[in-house]
Image: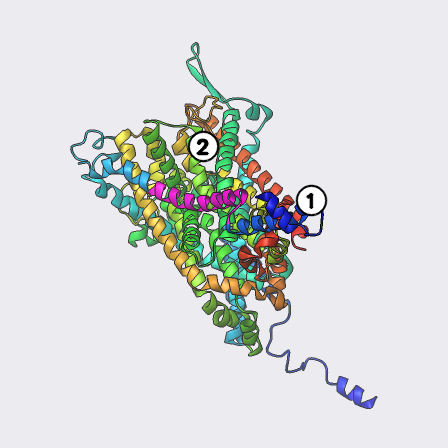
Amino acid sequence: MSDKISVQSAPPSSPGSVGTTTGKAPGDSPRNSAAASRGSSRVRPGDFIFRFLSTGSAVLIMIILAGVALFLIISAIPAITADWGTNDQLNTGPTAGFPNFWAYVGPLIWGTLWSAAIALLIGAPIGIGIALFISHYAPRRLAGILGYLVDLLAAVPSIVFGLWGIIVIRPFLLPLSDWLSANLGWIPLFGGTVTTTGSTILAGALVLAVMILPIITSISREIFLQTPRLHEEAALALGATRWEMIRMAVFPYAKSGIVSATLLGLGRALGETMAIALIISPAIIVSARLITEGQNSQTIAANIALNFPIATTLQRDALIGTGLMLFVISLAVNSIARVIVNGKPRSGKKKSKTPGPSSPGPLSRVPAGDFASATAIDVVAGSSRAGKPGDDGPAPEETNEGARF
Amino acid sequence: MTALSQRTKPTGPVGNSLTTGQLPRFSEIYVLVGAAVVSALLLLLIGFNVVGWLVLTAIFYLIALGLLSLVVENRRKATDRIVRGLVTIAFLLALIPLVSTLSTVIIQGAGELSWSFITQTGASTFDPDTLEVKQTPGALQAIVGTLIITGIAALISIPIGLFTSIYLVEYALPKQWLARTVTFLVDVMTGIPSIVAGLFAFSLFSILVGPKAFSGFSAAVALSVLMIPTVVRACEEMLRLVPGDLREASYALGVSKFATIVKIVLPTAIAGLITGIMLAIARVIGETAPIFLAASFTDNFNSNAFDGPMQTLPVLAYTGYAFPGSDIPASNASAWGAALLLVILVVILNLIARVIAKIFAPKGAR
């Protein structure tokens, strides 16, 4: 069979013995091209494994997230369905005195939302102000360093902020609490017995505000920097002052970005554990009082951290149940934030990054501390996406050259 | 010549139309100094304190500058100046906690930090004669625990995170549902409260292994849940920066996709990848709540990640205050020592990341 082929492919004039040797050389190319055409339809093992690993990891992330929800639910169900009044594990210790799970988790949810709201009230305006300062007011040369300084706040571990809150913020707020209680005590917010140690929800929320500053600042700064340069310059050329330019050109463009930055800050504040657990002296009640002791609403996360080591099995399940509620709340907040940020500015982000090199203006405004965007200016130009069509690139050449690797 | 002298003649206090109706150039600084002096004098009457002085200075500055600008200039300029002042104050306000936190940690922790603190296992010994419990400060068990747990977490998260980002950048088509879902989920995952990750690891291992399944590995799993999204985000950003031209050139030479990724894309982005991963590690190394729930805490030295509670630096700092031993000042002191060690670790990781970024960045950026 192969003889026939080699004879056929060999030049008919050549002698038999030579024919077989020369026949091999031309015979090589058809076999090779056959392998090549087969190779284009068949995936090579390296490619296949790599593709499998990558896709598998992506799927694994979905599994992990689902697993988090699933295992929390499985662990929480015994406590959620139990009758707390008659169960002898649940009517003692930290969970005593609650008729059912929902009565227990209700005040905790209130405390979580309340402390996060105060933190947001303090942190969001300051964070947005900082972002404005860095993006539009600070000297260009300094902007990168200043941005890095604020980002440093994000690098400080939360436990350090908690300890700092104990020995710095608590005494710092005492005079203010006394003053508020003496002069504004008739307002329900400042009612109740004034604190003597400073372990108030106000102190906790202030530390939370510090902790959410970097996230709000970095996202709003990014969004502010994406404002089309032409809009800003047009406003300035029409005689607007800097603030009017910001109000008329920057804020309308960055509106949804600011909202989602605030929501992401809220998400961080909701889940923050250590600052609250260390600073405030809590009670599981619904209370809006800011400067009392023992009448501060406890948050879900701090309650778990404080009671977990001393809890019995079923009490632990109850704590996990409250954690599940926290998970649901923060998932909702984060999803809303992401949907908002993905809706408009995300597309704006991709678009505005691309004109970076073409319009020379914004170059100087990219924070130098931000490694990613600093490199992005030089490299990106939207071309990374262009690499995609190479997937179905020329098949025969690919296999021939690819053999080298 | 005469025309020139005629033109220069009227200069003097009259000024031209461009500069009239404007505050002098350094007026903001004068106002600031004035506000500082006035508020200092005012506070000297009722008792001076720094915080009150700064607050009063800021208020006086804003009011004085606003009024001055309103009188000399106009309402729009006055608003502009006030906003500029407010924004600057906001920034300075953010620097206060940063400086205060770091200086507090250093001042409180420096006294505790010593060679023996790093190399000894902390323990409390009971003296039967005097009936006193003596605590020897030490953080060796916590340092070892932190390194082991963070190391395992990194071992789990880096491959998953890196491969996911490779999938998102190299394999997924932009409109594909899997890619969009994963991107969204990664975004959402960044927002998972750290304590929920701890609860997840605890319930996972108590269902799989049995009750009280505290172990370093469990804490590492909890940290991975927090670390994976950070790694994916950072690596994805870096891989997208690799110029498409490089990929196309590689494909044009007939190189397979796998070889292109391994030999072209990853080496180009390697500095950014390492930086991102370092920063992700620095982020999770300070996590307290998940480790506290999943690995609990102990005073014993335990280097076996799969068995028994493990102490870590952040948890040592937390328990030193929340659950102090019989000698409360000693517990608090070792908490500060642990906090300082932790900050030093984070700073080192950040520095390494920055240095790597600095060294390799120009190469990647053409």
Residue B341 picture location, percent across and down: 55, 33
Q: Which residue is mark 1?
A: A16
Chain letter of mark 1 equals: A
Nearest to the observer: residue B258 or residue A59: B258
Amino acid carrying label 1: it is: Gly
Label 2 sits on a secondary structure element that is helix
Residue A283 picture location, percent across and down: 29, 40
Q: Which residues are magenta?
A: A42-69
Instruction: Please name which of the two marks, 1 or 2, marks the residue nearer to the observer.
Output: 1
Amino acid carrying label 2: it is: Val
Instruction: Classify 10 Å Cα crowding around label 1: few (below 14), some (14-19), many (20 and above).
Output: few
Instruction: Classify 10 Å Cα crowding around label 2: few (below 14), some (14-19), many (20 and above).
Output: many
Q: Does the rendering let one see residue B22?
A: yes
Question: From mark 1 to mark 2, how far is it between C-alphas?
Answer: 85 Å
Nearest to the observer: residue A240 or residue B258: B258
Q: Which residue is mark 2?
A: B315
